[in-house]
Image (cartoon, rainbow, N blue to C red):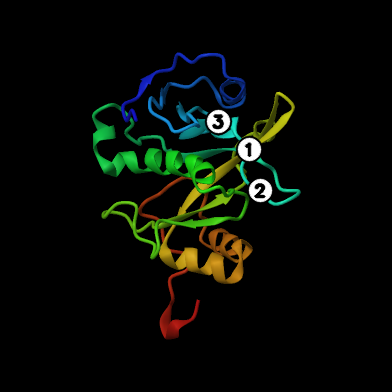
Amino acid sequence: MARQPEPAVLPHDPVGEHIAAHLGKPALYFHETQTDGVQVDIHVIGPTDSYPYVRLVTSGMSKQPMNVPEGAPAYAELMMALPANWQLDEAAMKDERWYWPVALLRHLAHYPHTERTWIGLGHSLPNGNPAKPYIASIGFCGAIVLPPASSPEPFHSVTVDGKDVYFHCVVPLYKEELNLARRRGFAALIDKFNQFNVTDVVDPARKNTARKKFLGLF
């Protein structure tokens, strides 16, 4: 599996064309060269004046349906938002400090197919059992799937060969936030995010919104 970025020269890909049309032409992409059935490429959209952050967006996850319950959408792609100065060149991809969002996005894009399950809005996904940090230098040990609220509305879905494909945003979580989402539902976590002005942009130094305060109260 390739870790290094490659020039953004893509084959015909309706999902990729949708990404470029609504978010901008990719500056580069991470191309998967080894796969067990679903090939997932990650498009890197650079910052713009209207959106001064980097977006990572998958294509390929939706080539196969997820194993969903009746009525749930079976086709999805994922995205993450990173600070504009996030390092994504070839040298940086050898450093887990910069590489972990790429690895996380790729893992989650394959997860429904390898585990015969599904990923949908509000799902919280721990990193292992028990959950452990993605890398030693950050506290995030899980993630939640949310709507791509900071992206243009027309981007949120696309129809490909009669299939409705939905884009979801992956937001990393601290252990306490993961536990809160699982105990009280993702709406309770969103309330905490709003209280602390947490956005979908990854900030490894952000506050833990569910950490217990004095006397053990939230």
The image shows residue 122, relative to residue 147, as above or below, that is below
The extreme bottom residue here reads 215
Report the disc number at residue 191.
Answer: none
> Mark 3 highlights which residue?
50
The image shows residue 162, relative to residue 189, as above or below, that is above
- The residue closer to the viewer here, 14 or 136, is 14
Q: Position of residue 30 (x, y in %)?
A: 40, 27
User: What separation in Å lies between label 3 and label 1 (alpha carbons)?
Assistant: 33 Å
Q: Amino acid at mark 3?
A: Ser
First in sequence: mark 2 or mark 3?
3
Q: Can you tell which of label 3 and label 1 is closer to the viewer? A: 1
- The residue closer to the viewer here, 140 or 69, is 69
Q: How many marks?
A: 3
> Mark 2 highlights which residue?
68
Q: Amino acid at mark 1?
A: Pro
Q: Can you tell which of label 2 and label 3 is closer to the viewer? A: 2
The image shows residue 8, relative to residue 168, as above or below, that is above
Q: Position of residue 47 (x, y in %)?
A: 46, 29
Q: Position of residue 178 (x, y in %)?
A: 48, 63
Q: Position of residue 84 (x, y in %)?
A: 40, 35
Q: Dots 2 and 1: beta carbons under 8 Å?
A: yes
First in sequence: mark 3 or mark 1?
3
- The residue closer to the viewer here, 107 or 202, is 107
> Mark 1 highlights which residue?
65
Q: Amino acid at mark 2?
A: Val
Secondary structure under the numbered disc 1 in the rendered image: loop
The image shows residue 38, relative to residue 139, as above or below, that is above
User: What separation in Å lies between label 2 and label 1 (alpha carbons)?
Assistant: 8 Å
Residue under the image location 62 percent in, 20 percent down:
14
